[in-house]
Amino acid sequence: MSVDPQHLLRELFATAIDAAHPQQVLEAYLPKDRSGRVIVIGAGKAAAAMAQVVERCWQGEVCGLVVTRYGHGAPCEKIEVVEAAHPVPDAAGLAVAKRVLELVSNLSEDDRVIFLLSGGGSALLALPAEGITLADKQSINKALLKSGATIGEMNCVRKHLSAIKGGRLGKACWPATVYTYAISDVPGDLATVIASGPTVADPSTSAEALAILKRYSIEVPASVRTWLQSPESETVKPGDPSLARSHFQLIARPQQSLEAAAVKCRQAGFSPLILGDLEGESREVAKVHAGIARQIVLHGQPLAAPCVILSGGETTVTVRGNGRGGRNAEFLLSLTDSLKGLPGVYALAGDTDGIDGSEDNAGAIMTPDSYARAVALGLSASDELDNNNGYGYFEALDALIVTEPTRTNVNDFRAILILESTKNDA
């Protein structure tokens, strides 16, 4: 089979991104009646690109304000685009959250609000609850990011420390009609977890938030603990009448991107194996992928090569070292360490938003000679893994993937391409 493995992997990544881009998916979901005035608000890495689609398609009066990550903006004529920090919130995110809340307060039954939501919105729309400072939220956020907590656990804490998340933004819009259009970046595509669910009811509790902080040994100020022990810290619960006119629609999810990549695989002559959305420590998830790849190479199971293993989701990294690298570099470094140059196996791991953690790369590529080339450079995969230095490892191999911000986000994308099986069953 004549194929350039690295080129194919990059094509699969591009296909996954394109399948979830607002320009491709949003318009079909907008209300059929696009006349009259609409207020557009939004938060997330895709917010600016989503706002562009609404501006292009809406026939009536449009105004509004959206916030996205630094570098992820896009030019809009009627909707203001503000950039702020992610994954740790900053003063810009705090300021824009206050403005968003003011914009939707005191609306009437005749008003319509479109809320454009995507991954990253939780950190970008940062408005601490009464008595909690931005510095408090920043320190707790940093600790959660390093702890290995899942995105669901992190967002449970964030919701209960917020004046805008956990349904509170939707409640502020009442009695206006609210249409939330969301691009999912979380395993399971739960509306309550995507960007901490600002316009949907939330069944989680403050007691659960406290338990999460205790589970990961995260120290919090007395003011935070006092707040979480107060009934006022509870989010808007299911059945609350203030959300009766709030409608939620998922417009893109990781599975769509995996399926689009699978179609591309078949067109190239490779059988796809979709593992779906996965959670867990990046290095441990990589070991499972390595085991499947090895079984395919050695025994042609659970499918025969040539094939591609596809997976998405959001893994976590418990930071123990001082190296550079996000979840995807960590995954790929652990995969490299596990396979140690297994012939005919290539892999790509990248974040569909174009930014792996807080670095300037989307991810990286592993080839069968990556392990040996690194050894020749004096690099030990296991030592670099201990130091959480996936970025440094693949930078030395000139194997980083740099896409710039993509302005969408369905989280991680992983593809392991296997050219042939030895099928040695002895």
Image (tube, rainbow, N blue to C red):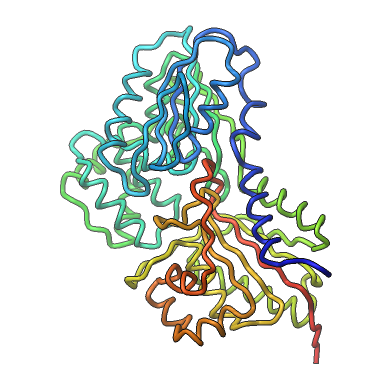
How far from the left and from the top, in percent, is residue 228? Answer: 26, 43
How far from the left and from the top, in percent, is residue 408? Answer: 54, 42
Name the residue: 51% across, 87% down.
Answer: 376
Vertical position of residue 103 compared to residue 208: above or below: above
Q: Quadrant of the N terminus?
A: bottom right
Vertical position of residue 368 compared to residue 57: above or below: below
Q: Quadrant of the C terminus?
A: bottom right
> Which residue extends farthest left?
222
State the count of labels: 0
Tell me if 24 is positioned left or right of 174 in this view.
right
Q: Quadrant of residue 349?
A: bottom right
Front-most of residues 214 and 4: 4
Front-most of residues 176 and 217: 176
Tell me if 414 is positioned left or right of 170 in this view.
right
Tell me if 38 is positioned left or right of 156 in this view.
right
How far from the left and from the top, in percent, is residue 291? Answer: 64, 76
How far from the left and from the top, in percent, is residue 163? Answer: 30, 32
Name the residue: 42% across, 78% down.
Answer: 384
Q: Quadrant of residue 265?
A: bottom right
Name the residue: 34% across, 47% down.
Answer: 157
Name the residue: 52% across, 70% down.
Answer: 398
Front-most of residues 7 and 351: 7
